[in-house]
Amino acid sequence: MAILATLPGHNLFTPLPTTPPPTTPTSHPPAQPPIPIPKYPPPVKSNKSPKHPPKSPPSPAFKTFHHRSKYYKPVRDGVLQSDGDRSIVVGESGLAYRLPGAPFEFQFSYSETPKAKPLAIREPAFLPFAPPTMPRPWTGKAPLKKSKKKIPLFESFNPPGESEGVRHLEMPGPYRLGKYPAETKSREEVLGRPLTKAEIKELVKPHWTSNRQVNLGRDGLTHNMLELIHSHWRRDEVCKVRCLGVPTVDMANVCRCLEEKTRGKIIVRVGGVIYLFRGRNYDHHTRPQYPVMLWKPATPVYPKLIQEAPEGLTKAEADELRMKGKTLPPICKLVKNGVYITLVKDVRNAFEGCPLVKINCTGIHASDYKKLGAKLKELVPCVLLSFDEEQILMWRGHNWKSMYRVAPSASSLAHSSFTNAFQVSENHCADSPKSNSIVSSSPKMMSLWKHAIESSKALLLDEICLGPDALLQKVEEFESSSQATLHSYPALILSSEDGSGRSKTEYDEDSQGEDYDEDSQDEDYDEDEMYGSKYDEYLINDSIPLGSLPVDVIAKQLRDNEEQR
């Protein structure tokens, strides 16, 4: 190779060609795959239900945009936002809206607004009403042409200005907001004279099975329901309102708000169903017209219901009560959209036996059972401890008082003549809990107890803490001793006019005294007047001869009948 490299005119690396070789065009089509790709139909979905079924979509009532925003603005009492005469205020009733000429401050809910003052708002302060400059709501269509029908006009109640010789006429219809006649009828004048029972029955009877009603739910009496109730009153004299869910805990508040805002009269209430009467002199065309809320305002931020250390407790004591509440059985289970009229009474009765009470709220939305807890805190009253595991745990508090009156102690009975008979042993059981629920009795009942004990018809136990066996032994002993007393009833043999002797008790109608009524009896009555010297004559008498009692006569007759057989 070295020799070839030294030879002249010999190049080992040939140069590349300047032009590429010509390519001959091929007339053959591209090669096809040997087997065509099959086209299968889409797979058929199996009818078997999946192991984990999809969750049902949440209710549209809970789809609010402020849940995804971080807007937080602290508020204080006073005006938040104002636009001339239209303003948003925070007062005793919470967040309210003031409009010119309105009879009262508007709110989203009149019955379910918490009594606690709001701390902040979750959205900018805007009035949820249409602006006053909008003549009609935008519907995407052009306004209709004017009607050729001539509508009679009447003179305006509130003319725009004072001008001589000019009459201002208006079309008939409901009064706009802020425009009312000079002399309006009061609520009593609209209602008229009270309804009789026959009239109430006649008005309510068509609505018993009717489903034309106003449904009042978790938000309570809302502002737009006022207009809805008036639309029902346009055709019927009675509007049926069905209440379900949280508002039914305090039906008295719902009834008060309905009568106050609608100016009607509740004539019948059955459970959570209310029948609202519009009045005898109601006129739909001359009623005030309220503006409609275009959206639901965001709920303000309120103080927390559950605190780490509630009122009168330390954090350690509160945690200990919460641990005890985990093993505590609930007193009831609430269903979704139920009627909870007796819930407050049930909780108060449960507090008589246990300082902790738990309510099972499985299946109810968190906002609903939190509202229930807030209502129970005010109505019972009680202290809320937790909402864990969809359970409402409450504590009755240090200032709890029993619903029953405390019975008089032994010292208060010292002046009575039968104090010694009701002396109770002071040796109480060490492990027995103290009870504040003791039955209080009237003097008449105490006298009856005294007479029963003296006549050996009742027994006064010297020991309170007796077991079942000891108590049964006491009862058996008393029964055996009371039988002799019962069969030793005083009797006297009297001879009748026909000479046939028969036994007759001397305790006749005259010795029984006058009939008394428990309600009409005065507390300051004299015991000797009821149980006087006449009754003492018929106590047990040892001088009665053997065989003179009525039971002895009956026994003798039975023996004679058996001998004759």
Image (cartoon, grey):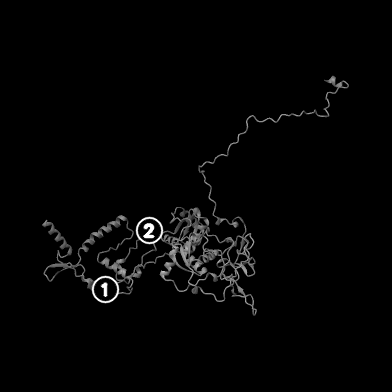
Secondary structure of residue under mark 1: loop
Q: Is residue 121 left or right of residue 195?
A: right
Which image quarter: residue 33? top right
Q: Is residue 77 left or right of residue 441?
A: right
Foreground disc of the pair 1, 2: 1
Please provide percent x and percent y for residue 438: 37, 64
Q: Is residue 524 left or right of residue 322?
A: left
Measured in 3D between alpha carbons, the distance from the residue under mark 1 to the one under mark 2, in whole angstroms, is: 45 Å
User: Residue placed at 27% from the left, 74% from the top?
Assistant: 529
Circle count: 2
Q: Is residue 87 visible?
A: yes
Q: For mark 1, what is the residue?
A: 514
Please provide percent x and percent y for residue 532: 25, 73
Q: For mark 2, what is the residue?
A: 432
Which comes before the other along the chain, label 1 or label 2? 2
Please provide percent x and percent y for residue 198: 41, 69
User: Residue placed at 37% from the left, 58% from the top?
Assistant: 432
Q: Quadrant of the N terminus?
A: top right
Amino acid type at mark 2: Ser
Which image quarter: residue 531? bottom left
Of residues 18 and 153, the one drawn nearer to the viewer in this rendering: 153
Of residues 79 and 464, the one drawn nearer to the viewer in this rendering: 79
Which image quarter: residue 164? bottom right
Q: Residue furthest front?
A: 148
Amino acid type at mark 1: Glu
Q: Are the residues at dot 1 and dot 2 in contact (C-beta closer than 8 Å)?
A: no
